[in-house]
Amino acid sequence: MPTENLDLQYNDEEIREFIESAVAQTDTRQQPRFYAVTGSHVYGFDSPDSDIDVRGVHLASAEEYAYLQTPVEEITINMDGTTEEFEEYAEIDLRSYELKKFGSLLAKANYNVIELVFEAPTVMNGIPLEMDALEALIREYLPMNVPHAYLGMAKSNYYKYLDPEKSKGYDPQPKKFLYVYRGLLGAKYVLLYEDIEADIRTLATEVDGGDPQLVDELISHKREAGDSVVTSPLEERARAAIVEQFNNLDALPKPNKSGYREALDDWMHNVRA
């Protein structure tokens, strides 16, 4: 999906300039390599005030891992408030992984980084052949434990924000229901199709029992009413849909990742070469 299909307040060139100034900082040899827009813009329920979530990969010199002070695993900008000297890009949240950290997340079949490879609109790609090879590599091993990761995210968000039995933390905003529902549908989708889909509208259409009308109503409520909680009838429908998808997820199969870690090592070697 090209970024021109997204309603962003920065163009690709401006985002690239931001990435380069944030990652390729003075007195470092960090090379920004691959970055894409993720978060609510890719999930299909962004609002006019949504931040632009950018994730990606940078390279440090391999020889730096031979020293006591090894390269930082992640660079984050504007993640917890606006980072000093980046006020001009206050609406962009950046998380950049050094290749080794990125590889470790891939080895765990982390759905966030796998969505980055499969679904996220690219704003910078200095390693196009390598990223195509990575997508093909991951696709060969799906579903692995990606459904488990989606399900874990859904459960965590449900019990943290949507459990009415909890006196603290209960926060039935539309975006909370959307995150949980997307996780459950995403788990089912990768099991059914051995593929990745991030957009919740597509998931609700393609997964058995998905409710596209409910998704549309939750998104409309999020965009029109902001952080206000959903109405009681909508909450009841959303909760029923979530319970239905929980019940539809049978005992997840034991993940088979035989050879996956070794294949990732080979891929990382090619990227560093």
Image: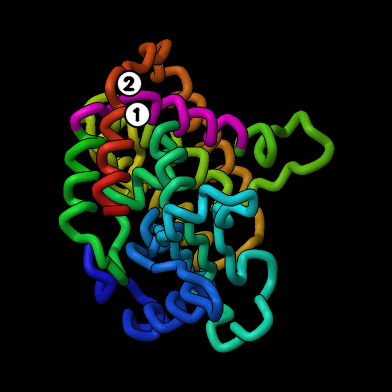
Q: Which residue is mark 2?
A: 257
Name the residue furthest right. 167
SS of the residue under disc 2: loop
Left or right: residue 134 versus residue 10 is: left
Residue under numbered circle 1: 261
Q: Quadrant of residue 134?
A: top left
From the top left corner, tell me how far across and down residue 6 is, in percent: 32, 71
Q: Which residues are magenta?
A: 140-156
Viewer-side residue, 33 vs 110: 33
Residue at 40% x, 19% y: name it: 249
Task: Mark 1 and mark 2 in contact? Answer it, CB < 8 Å.
Answer: yes
Image depth: mark 1 or mark 2 in front = 1
Question: Residue 268, image x and y in percent?
Answer: 31, 45
From the viewer's side, name the closer residue of 93 and 261.
261
The residue positioned 64% from the left and 49% from the top of the image is 68
Task: Please name the amino acid that badge 1 sits on.
Answer: Arg
Q: Position of residue 152 (x, y in %)?
A: 53, 29
Front position in the image: 104 or 60: 60
At x 31%, y 41%, the residue is 203
- Quarter of the picture containing the N terminus is bottom left
* Residue type indicated by callout 2: Lys
Counting from the top left corner in percent of width and height, residue 205 is at 26, 41
